[in-house]
Amino acid sequence: MKKLMLLFVLIVVILVVFSPDMAAQCPMCKMSAESNLRDGGTAGKGLNNGILYMLALPYILISTLGYLWYRNRKNCDTPT
């Protein structure tokens, strides 16, 4: 079980470290933000960070639930 968990963590770390820059946007949002910045506005500066923030929350929640499940399963396997 420890080998499987180590493999999972290693795969996640490799994907995070070697993934390309995740500053992608839909074309319509990107065009709107670029035109706003070109006209002197500041609405588009935090768009990428907001997208990444919203994208990270589900992964954090799933990771937390997985950890809690693993910890509780580990506690159930030990004889009392």
Image (tube, grey):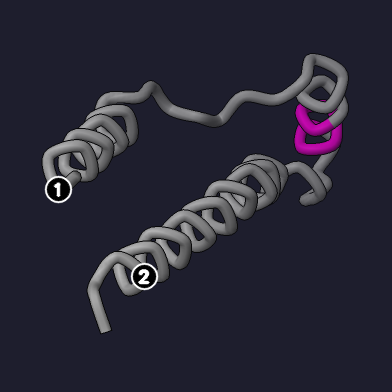
Q: Residue 58 at x, y = what percent?
A: 63, 49
The residue at 87%/19% (across/down) is 28
Q: Nearer the viewer, residue 50 or 19?
A: 19
The residue at 33%/35% (across/down) is 16
Q: Residue 63 at x, y = what percent?
A: 47, 54
For this orientation, the residue located farthest to the bottom is 80
Give the amino acid type for the residue marked by disc 1 in the picture: Lys
Mark 1 and mark 2 lie on one chain; the one further toward the N terminus is 1
Quarter of the figure with residue 17: top left
| Magenta region | 33-38
Tell me, for residue 76, which label it has, or none.
Answer: 2
Q: Residue 70 at x, y = what percent?
A: 37, 59
Does the magenta portion include 34?
yes
For this orientation, the residue located farthest to the top is 27
| Residue 18 as seen in the image, left or right of residue 19 | left
Magenta region, main secondary structure: helix
For this orientation, the residue located farthest to the front is 80
Residue receiving disc 1: 2
